[in-house]
Image (spheres, grey):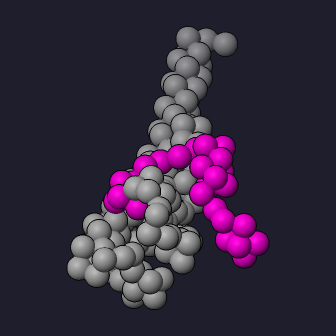
Amino acid sequence: MNRRQKAIIIKLITITSITAVTVIAMINFKDYVNRSEAGRAMEHLGKLVLQYRKEHGGVPPESYVDNIREDLEGHVRLGKLQYRALWIVPESGPNEILAYTEKKYRSFFLNDGFIVLRLDGRVEWMNKPDFDKILAEQQTPMEKAQE
């Protein structure tokens, strides 16, 4: 093999490697943006829920959330939203999970998990084992039976 052939092979390998790294980075970036948009929609929902609680003294019914969902910025990224207002009682603390949505990724850098809205309006990301543990502690037997 002469020098010219070696140079062509090295350039081909370099371009192929750079292309592969770029494609993988773009896929992971897309998943990151998707997760961020879902988090932003959940934060917006949290603000509206807190405003409703301030005006009406309790959490809004599921029908209210269903009606405003389309107006949330990034609502498309939420996926299947689970709203637990039916199981929230006056004794529920600020750490009670009010709403959540599961996010699954085929990414090397992002793990599957849940975007969680707490009763006090906080939004956070939880990995599946932590979420399952906390939700199991907060669920009543009737709620578990309804799943």
Identify the image quadrant of the C terminus: bottom right
Q: Is residue 25 left or right of residue 134?
A: left
Tell me the magenta residue range. Answer: 118-147
Task: Judge whether 4 appears above or below 72 on screen.
Answer: above
Q: Is residue 6 left or right of residue 98?
A: right
Of the pair 125 and 120, the residue shown nearer to us: 120
Task: Judge whether 15 appears above or below 64 on screen.
Answer: above
Q: Position of residue 67 (x, y in %)?
A: 39, 88
Question: For the point 49% across and 74% down, which residue is it?
Answer: 85
Question: For the point 41% across and 61% down, which residue is it?
Answer: 119
Of the pair 83 and 58, the residue shown nearer to us: 58
Identify the image quadrant of the N terminus: top right
Q: Position of residue 77 (x, y in %)?
A: 46, 66
- Occupied quadrant, residue 90: bottom left
On whether residue 65 falls in the magenta region, the answer is: no
Task: Judge whether 68 appears above or below 107 on screen.
Answer: below
On whether residue 145 falls in the magenta region, the answer is: yes
